[in-house]
Image (cartoon, rainbow, N blue to C red):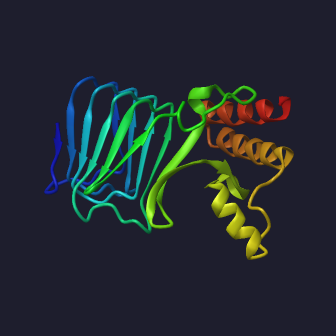
């Protein structure tokens, strides 16, 4: 499958789902600069256009290949959970991701496959780090939290109670908009958070 650079229409976000032993080439930049890959096995995904965030979930034996000068080491990242025995090629560099090897653990109602990581360029090399949630539920690494603490910005994290309250508010807003499925997700996350 090829998503060419010269598309006549714009794509908001690109999803690659439930593929087996296929090759996908992504030559277009999405409006959100977000590509999501899930439930794929034995596939190769080749990015020839810069999309800032690639999210990979529940994949096995995936090969991600970035063309030369496509991965911006200062801005781009790969967020992943439940990804096993997979390789990311950053032009000349290669980095392996595997949620078991990377240290995934189950936590409360969260399964081991839901343990989230980010692979990015930091301190002169590509590295995979555990994702923690910050104020506003933004994903941060331990290094980013330490940097915030050093600047006097707090630890970037918030209490479970405050996070649950924000989930509840999100649920109320989604419910008021008639988005009942999203409201149910927010409410469930809030309850699960306080049960831990």
Q: Quadrant of the N terminus?
A: top left
184 left or right of 89?
Answer: right
Residue at 21% over, 29% down: 22
- Between 190 and 42, the residue placed more toward the observer is 42
Residue 156 point in image, percent of width and height: 74, 61
- To which quarter of the image does residue 41 belong? top left
122 left or right of 5?
Answer: right
117 lies above or below 82: below
65 lies above or below 178: below
- Between 1 and 153, the residue placed more toward the observer is 153
Give the tally of numbered discs.
0
- Between 173 and 111, the residue placed more toward the observer is 111
70 lies above or below 12: below
Q: Quadrant of the C terminus?
A: top right
- To which quarter of the image does residue 104 belong? top right
Residue 123 point in image, percent of width and height: 51, 67
Residue 120 point in image, percent of width and height: 46, 56
Residue 92 point in image, percent of width and height: 26, 57
93 left or right of 107?
Answer: left
170 lies above or below 192: below
Residue at 79% over, 75% down: 152
Residue at 40% over, 26% down: 39
């Amino acid at each position: 499958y090829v998503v060419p650079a010269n598309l006549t229409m714009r794509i908001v976000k690109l999803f690659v789902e439930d593929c087996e032993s296929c090759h996908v080439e992504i030559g277009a930049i999405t409006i959100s600069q977000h590509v999501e890959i899930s439930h794929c096995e034995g596939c190769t995904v080749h990015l020839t256009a810069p999309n800032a965030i690639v999210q990979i979930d529940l994949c096995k034996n995936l090969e991600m290949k970035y063309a030369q000068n496509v991965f911006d080491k200062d801005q781009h990242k790969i967020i992943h959970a439940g990804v096993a025995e997979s390789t990311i090629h950053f032009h000349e560099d290669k980095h392996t991701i595997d949620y078991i090897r990377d240290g995934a653990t189950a936590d409360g109602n969260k399964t081991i496959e839901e343990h989230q990581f980010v692979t990015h360029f930091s301190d002169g090399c590509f590295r995979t780090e555990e994702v923690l949630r910050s104020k506003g539920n933004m994903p941060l690494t331990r290094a980013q939290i330490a940097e915030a603490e050093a600047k006097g910005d707090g630890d970037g994290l918030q209490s479970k109670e405050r996070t649950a309250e924000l989930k509840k508010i999100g649920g109320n807003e989604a419910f008021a908009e008639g988005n009942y499925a999203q409201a149910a997700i927010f409410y469930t996350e809030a309850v699960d958070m306080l049960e831990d």
